[in-house]
Amino acid sequence: MTGLAAASARAGRALHSPPEDLTQVQLVWVEKQVEHWIRFGREVRQQVVDRRRRILSFAPGATFALVRWAANERGTVLSRLDILRAVAPGEACQTLPTVTPGGDILLRVDGWPKVERMLQLIDAIEAASIDPVEVAPDHWRHVHNRLAAGETPRGYTMQRHRASLLARRIGA
């Protein structure tokens, strides 16, 4: 089966997968109190719970960015951005609030200055005509490690992206 055919088959299975095979993310939006949103990712299902909550489901292997923000009467109490890879049933994962069963955390930043920096880095990747969903997981880990060390991460160029896609195609 060619790479494209295999990807199509996986996508078709994901659309018809039972919910227990999917990673579910509960998003909450209570204006100026709690705001959760997906910055990028391709969900395969969406369930609207009520006007403030919905649940998005991601197929195993899908990469997505979850932003969580919360405030009280004194101001912001939580600003966090996580880039996750949805896991397959039985696969080891890290737990996260609002994510069931959890995911492979590729990147995590806390605090609005770091979250804002990450949003700018994601914008830069999109400005280079690269879908952040397709970015190599190792790049997100690199960015996480560099930011944690107070260093500037390498940019994700089209050349790096092509190399990542070729490596995926040959199974490296």
Image: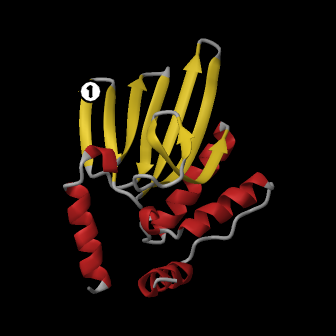
Residue occupying the far front of the picture:
90
Asked which quadrant contains residue 111, the reply is top right
Residue drawn 39% across the image and 34% down it: 26
Position in image of residue 144 (x %, y %):
67, 56
Q: Nearer the viewer, residue 130 or 135?
A: 135
Q: Which residue is mark 1?
A: 49
Residue drawn 61% across the image and 45% down it: 116
Q: Nearer the viewer, residue 40 or 9?
A: 9
10 Å crowding of disc 1: few (<14), some (14-19), many (20+): few
Q: Is residue 16 above or below residue 99?
A: below
Position in image of residue 62 (x %, y %):
40, 59
In-image side of 111 versus 42 (left or right): right
Q: Is residue 85 above or below residue 142?
A: above
Q: Tag 1: residue type?
A: Val
Asked which quadrant contains residue 156, the reply is bottom right
Q: Nearer the viewer, residue 127 or 65?
A: 65
Position in image of residue 140 (x %, y %):
59, 62
Asked which quadrant contains residue 37, the reply is top left
Judged from the image, the secondary structure of the residue bearing numbered disc 1 is strand
In-image side of 21 versus 145 (left or right): left
Residue drawn 31% across the image and 51% down it: 43
Residue drawn 61% across the image and 29% down it: 78
